Structure formats: structure tokens, C-alpha cells
Image (cartoon, rainbow, N blue to C red):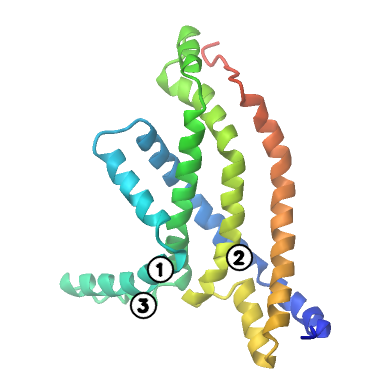
């Protein structure tokens, strides 16, 4: 099958116009997921009674189900449940008037939160207990020990996995089109459908994703090198 590169050249500038939508979906989802993931990792790592078990079950369920199913639940089932709830309390709020992006943020955050949680938890495991003891020996309290000793080392160890999760999130945003959010993949599909050039449309979107992902990896490299300073346990004496 011969590729119509003329279509690719014409479609490319139209598709890249939707990069801001893809980046918005990615960054907002990540900003929602990161604090939730860190909190889940801490509760799980410290084996908080009852809560850690719930978190482990939740992680197992999310890791064992496809993102498509999670999107279906959030975008199709959740609005029905909320609509019934609004009716039960006598509210006339129209759930289906909510911007589709809100449902996209929720759906994409579900799996991203788990990815970040597992990455941070693995990072916390790498921190030697001796580092905590050394921190207390120089006068740091528990909060200072966490922020100046434990978390920098854990985050440094988890950073490559978190970046991989961020890259995966960029690609997963393509599923937002199933929730009527038009981003780069959605726009490419629309263009391909207009002229029945689906192969060329997917070639176009592949090129755009490659550019985005290579850019993210290039930006992340220097940060990873800077974070390496925390590996091995450098204690910054906050008490001084």
C-alpha cells in the first residue's frame, strides 16, 4: 500500500494545532495524580492499619483492568450514577453538561496515580534505614528527615519510572477521543475519515507523538542527572 505523503504534509500542521490539548490533558492529569500517588505510596510503605490493605486491593484492581474499561466506567457509568443521586436529593443539576475534559482527567488519573504510587513506593524502599538514623543524630525531626533525606532519595530513585509514566500518559491521552475530547489523535482520525486516508492519518499522528516524547525525554535527562546527587544519601542539615 502506497502512502500519500502529500496528505501527511497537509495534515501535519492541522494535527500539531491540537498539541496544546494533549499537553493540557497530560499535565493536569499528572498534577492530580502526583500528590495522590505520593500519599498512597506513603500509606502503603508505612503499612497503615486497614488503609494500606485497601490501597493494595485498589492498585491490584486498577493494574488488572484496561484503561478502556476505566474510561467506560468514568464516562458512561459515573454520569448515570451521579444523575440518579442528583435526582434523589432533589437537585436539577445536569451531570451531562459537565465538560468532557473533566471526565477525561478523572479517567486518566486513575491509572496514572497507581503508576506514580508504585514508583514512589519502590523509591522509598531504596532508602537505607541508616539514613534516617543519621538524620536524627544530626538533630532533624521526622518531618525534616522526610523532606530533606528520605523523599529526595526516594524521588531520585523513582524519577526514571515517573518519567516513563509521564510518557505513557502522553500516549494514553489518545483515548480521550472516546470521551469526545479532540486531541492530536482525534484530529488525525477526523482528517483521515474525511478523505479515507486512515493510514496517512496514523503516520501523521505517530510523527507528532515521536516529537513530543523525544522532547520530554531530552528535558528529563538533565533533571535526572541533577537528582543523582541525592543517591547514596546526602543529608542536608536543616537544623543548622
| Nearer to the camera, 24 or 127 | 127
Q: Earlier in the sequence, mark 2 or mark 1?
A: 2
User: Mark 1 or mark 3: which comes first in sequence?
Assistant: 1
Q: In the image, residue 20 lies at what x, y percent?
A: 64, 65
Q: Secondary structure at mark 3?
A: helix
Q: Nearer the viewer, residue 236 or 157?
A: 157
Place of residue 51 in the rendered image (x, y in percent of width and height, measured from the top left): 27, 40
Residue highlighted by disc 2: 22
125 sits left or right of 96 in the view: right
- Measuring 62% from the left and 25% from the top, which residue is drawn there? 230
Give the CA separation, mark 2 to mark 1.
21 Å
- Which residue shows up at 56% across the image and 58% down it? 169
- Which image quarter holds the C terminus? top right
Residues at badges 3 and 2 in contact (C-beta under 8 Å)? no
Q: Mark 2, residues whose alpha carbon is within 10 Å: few (<14), some, or many (≥20)?
A: many
Kindly identify which residue carries mark 1: 69
How many C-alpha atoms fall within 10 Å of the one at disc 3: few (<14), some, or many (≥20)? few
Q: Is residue 32 above or below residue 12?
A: above
Is residue 32 among what the camera can see? no
Q: Is residue 21 above or below residue 218?
A: below
- In the image, which is nearer the foreground, mark 2 or mark 1? 1
Residue at 31% x, 77% y is 94
Indicate the position of residue 86 as horizontal and vertical percent values: 23, 71
**Left or right of residue 110, residue 15 in this image:** right
Q: Secondary structure at mark 2?
A: helix
- Residue topped by disc 3: 96
How far is disc 3 from disc 2 in space, using C-alphas? 22 Å
Counting residues from the N terminus, which is met first, the one under dot 3 or under dot 2? Answer: 2
In the shown orientation, is residue 82 left or right of residue 74? left
Q: Residue furthest top?
A: 137
Amino acid at each position: 500500500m502506497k502512502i500519500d505523503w502529500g496528505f501527511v504534509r497537509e495534515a501535519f500542521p492541522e494535527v500539531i494545532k491540537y498539541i496544546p490539548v494533549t499537553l493540557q490533558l497530560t499535565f493536569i492529569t499528572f498534577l492530580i495524580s502526583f500528590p495522590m500517588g505520593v500519599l498512597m505510596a506513603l500509606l502503603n510503605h508505612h503499612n497503615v492499619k486497614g488503609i494500606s490493605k485497601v490501597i493494595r486491593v485498589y492498585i491490584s484492581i486498577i493494574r488488572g483492568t484496561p484503561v478502556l474499561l476505566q474510561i467506560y466506567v468514568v464516562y458512561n457509568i459515573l454520569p448515570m450514577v451521579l444523575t440518579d443521586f442528583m435526582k434523589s436529593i432533589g437537585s436539577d443539576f445536569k451531570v451531562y453538561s459537565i465538560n468532557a475534559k473533566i471526565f477525561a482527567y478523572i479517567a486518566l488519573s486513575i491509572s496514572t496515580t497507581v503508576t506514580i504510587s508504585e514508583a514512589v513506593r519502590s523509591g522509598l524502599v531504596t532508602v537505607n534505614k541508616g539514613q534516617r538514623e543519621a538524620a536524627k543524630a544530626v538533630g532533624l525531626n521526622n518531618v525534616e528527615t522526610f523532606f530533606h533525606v528520605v523523599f529526595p532519595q526516594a524521588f531520585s530513585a523513582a524519577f526514571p519510572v515517573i518519567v516513563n509514566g509521564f510518557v505513557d500518559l502522553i500516549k494514553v491521552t489518545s483515548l480521550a477521543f472516546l470521551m469526545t475530547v479532540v486531541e492530536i489523535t482525534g484530529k488525525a482520525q477526523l482528517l483521515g475519515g474525511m478523505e479515507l486516508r486512515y493510514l496517512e492519518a496514523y503516520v501523521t499522528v505517530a510523527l507528532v507523538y515521536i516529537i513530543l516524547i523525544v522532547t520530554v525525554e531530552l528535558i528529563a535527562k538533565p533533571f535526572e542527572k541533577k537528582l543523582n546527587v541525592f543517591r547514596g544519601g546526602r543529608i542536608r542539615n536543616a537544623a543548622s
